[in-house]
Image (cartoon, rainbow, N blue to C red):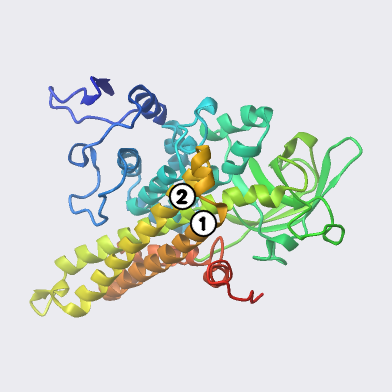
Amino acid sequence: MRCIIAGQLVCHGLRTGRQPSLPQSLSMYAMLARRTRRWPSVSPRLFSTSPARRLMETTGFTDTQLAVRDAVGQICSRFPNTYWQERDQTEEDPKDFHAALAADGWLGIALPEALGGAGLGISDATMMMQAITESGAGMAGAQAIHANVYATQPLARFGTDEQLRDTVPNIISGKWRVCFGVTEPNAGLDTLRLSTAAVKQPDGSYKVSGQKIWITCAQVAAKMILLARTTPLARVQKPSEGLSLFCIDLDRDQPGLDMRKIRKLGGRAVDANEVFFDNYEIPADSLVGEEGQGFRIILHGMNAERCLLAGEALGLGYAALGRAAQYARDRVVFQRPIGQNQGIAHPLADAYIKLEAAKLATYHAARLYDQSGTEEEDRASVTQASVGVACNSAKYIAAEAAFNACEKAVLTHGGMGYAAEYDVERWFRECLVPRIAPVSREMILNYIGEKVLDLPRSY
């Protein structure tokens, strides 16, 4: 355990030569932060479980972010690459990994302290997600908790006191897992034209009918953050109107709910699904915020998701690059390490530079996101438009940098890059996710062209 004496971090156990341990829960970190008005600085030499040869330059990160990176890394070290290889092959949910993070409070990293969370920002949550993928867990590890972090942001900001008291503590504790129900097969990225309808009943409840697709963790989730149309498209002035957000129970015993698992290329440990609603009844108090304002509310979670996914992509890229560099140092052909050849070294160096550039863009975007929701003067200076541009740009560049690093890692390994035991093939399969989801590269370029360059809209 740690304690603060005269503002300094003291680690019990150093005098006896025992390995100092990190706090048992994130709430301990929060307590120390409140006591000192800052987060404790953590010595990477004392507490890091990562290899001594760190790739990512950590200069400029806050003490909070470094503490998060270190503590989450320690938890992840209990789940080696062989664990993730097995889960990938058996498609078994990593529930013990989810439970380990929940036990130490990490699922509440960006949720209010009053509800049991740590009250930190998306900047810190992004660092957590990067630490997970970088540990070797890859996108499967990240997706096991991904929605618990970003999908709860609209709920935390716009939910009623009753919704927050009943739902958030159970999510933080790990009792309930969450999924995000937005994407539909016939709408794709045209979210404003989704057709899943929530029809209000005389008693105030709603009946939901429609279909969602690519819903991660629906098989194991107890709750879904659902976007549905409460006013038909033909009866609204703008397509963004008439959509409402709900926090609903996924009751498999209740009529009107069906799920079908989708077999997929990567991240196989975590399920992806089609979800079908047929007059599925949900109570009136499941509505989050005002009826008809769901699209405006959900944007709060979408920008957060872009930051988190960018961090996940970074971690994947650094993991693959680190493995490739190690292999290039160790693999000897023609009586010399293959990394001595510029044909090997230069592509890896190029991958590193691109990851470092993407890192700067990612944490800039996360910082803007956090500032836009804090003090009044920050909200005035950081517009939602600037947040949207930064978050989309970060997601784009991080996804591209990760893909480049993972591809180069496979090629550096040559034939062994195709072997599951070397992990780079698993990471390469998974690195396609940040390029595709939650928004495609092409739609981000459309967005930047229209919003930044003032070019005519192309769609």
Crowdedness near tag 2: few (<14), some (14–19) or many (≥20) residues, C-alpha within 10 Å: many
Q: Position of residue 379 (x, y in %)?
A: 53, 44
**Residue in front for this viewpoint, 229 or 416:** 229
- The kind of residue tagged 1 is Ser
- The kind of residue tagged 2 is Leu
The residue that label 1 is drawn on is: 386
- In the picture as drawn, the residue positioned furthest to the top comes out as 5
The relative height of residue 241 versus residue 164 in the rendered view (above or below) is below
> Which quadrant of the structure image shows residue 312?
bottom left
In the rendered structure, find residue 368 and report the number of the disc placed on it: 2
Question: On the picture, is 22 further left or further right than 257?
Answer: left
The relative height of residue 334 versus residue 47 in the rendered view (above or below) is below
Q: Disc 1 on helix, strand or loop?
A: helix
Instruction: Give the residue displayed 76% in from the left and 60% down from the top.
Output: 239
**If the image is split into quadrants, where does the N terminus sit?**
top left
In the rendered structure, find residue 195 and report the number of the disc placed on it: none
Instruction: Give the residue displayed 20% in from the left and 73% down from the top.
Output: 345
**If the image is split into quadrants, where does the C terminus sit?**
bottom right
Question: On the picture, is 276 further left or further right than 35?
Answer: right
Q: Position of residue 197 (x, y in %)?
A: 80, 53
